[in-house]
Image: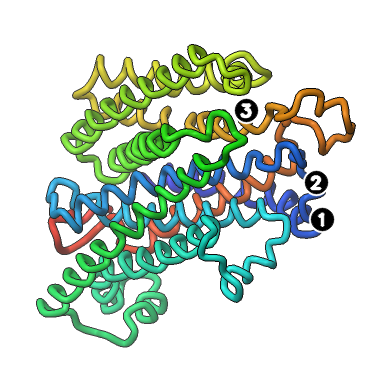
Amino acid sequence: MSQKSFNALFAVAVIGLIVGAWGLLERLMYGLKPVAFGSYVPWGLWVAFYLFFLGLSAGAFLITMLTYLFGMKRFEKIGRLSAFTVLIALLCEVLFITLDLGQMTRIYRFLISPSFTSFMTWMFILFNAMGLIYTLKVYFLVREDIIAWANDGNRPGQALYRLLSFGKTSYGESDHRRDEHRVHVLSMISLPVGLLFYGMNGAFFAILMNRPIWNSAFTPLLFIMAALLSGGALITFLTHIYMRDDELVTSLGRAVLFVLVVFQFLEVLQFFVGYQAGVPSVVASLDLISKGPYWWTFWIVHVLIGSLVPLILLTAMPHNPRAVAWASFLIVITFIAVRFNFVIPDLAVYKLEGLEYTFYHDRLRTHYTPNLNEWLVSLWVVSLGLVTFLLGTRWLPVISSQRGGFENVQ
């Protein structure tokens, strides 16, 4: 990424932090009073963003597994960047889901009185395990360069690098082998932890029996394919921006094309089976997606911009890295519409006939539109993630390396 592009993107992220701070302040001062969701639609925009970043982290997680566990040398150039992307996505995930909680300060109860029969408890445990594993993994991946940078008197940030070196001033072949072994062990541990974590999130929705679309064995599969599509597209786009490896970008583009076709096929199946079965609650949920107030987020944002245009670019120009990068970018930025249309319509169906006439209150309506506070808070969290990512790529050696097949990229 050029310095000009970095400065422009960083400025946008900082402005987002400043503007979104007002929404965050309201959330911290007044709890959930400023938000638009209520009793019948208890989850809103923040849960959609949580699932969005969950998918991004899962795609990056897959790349790290292929690189550091299964030894696929082809992906070594993006291994570090993928591991760092997992960390940033996890940061955004935890912020969104924590802000969505009514009483954020009570999160400590997962520690003092866990219920091991609850999916929420296991999601908490597995999330923290993923955070710890990937913090260590990123550190051991960059430690060699951190020590080298600490000894480079001409490089800015000497105090930071000496701190991260923990007093170590030299790095030999034995250190290199030990860190490689540590990364491999952490990858072995993270494989079952990651599969459980991502699978648990899909199963959490699938077991809710009063939700017509969620309550299906189909849901975890859609979660997996959605994660592979959005996360894989993100890594493809970042590879083009940071690595400028045309061959790798086009190779990743072919994988993204395959997953995109499979994901679209599964979506068609979901609508076909749902309408053919004729279950009123399922039909009502599907109608809200395709013909409801937010039909445009499905047909225009997701189907047209996020699916058909990338499909055309990836099939018509598969060997053009710029076209592949643009297709991947469109998939990523429009995927929030997929998550929004997964979360809201299934909540916006009255589960009892006539319930809407029994009590009347704004918090007892199923029509949900994210308000300004929710958008401002979302802007703040996304901007924080972007600032952290940009600073990390600039001040940490996550896109350059002296070992493991990585190339120095400045």
Quadrant for the N terminus in the image: top left
Q: Which residue is mark 2?
A: 34
Q: Residue furthest left?
A: 173
* Residue situated in front as seen by the camera: 52 or 312: 52
Is 225 positioned to the left or the right of 404 in the image? right
Is 397 positioned to the left or the right of 115 in the image? left
| Secondary structure type for disc 1 | helix
Q: Is residue 213 above or below residue 25?
A: above
* Type of the residue with mark 1: Tyr
Q: For label 2, count other residues whose C-alpha is less than 10 Å away and answer few (under 14), some (14-19) or many (20+).
A: some
* Residue situated in front as seen by the camera: 367 or 86: 367
Q: Which residue is mark 1?
A: 30
Is 14 positioned to the left or the right of 398 in the image? right
* Type of the residue with mark 2: Pro
Residues at circles 3 and 2 in contact by the CB criterion of under 8 Å: no
Q: Position of residue 122 (x, y in %)?
A: 48, 61
Q: CA separation, marks 3 and 2? A: 22 Å
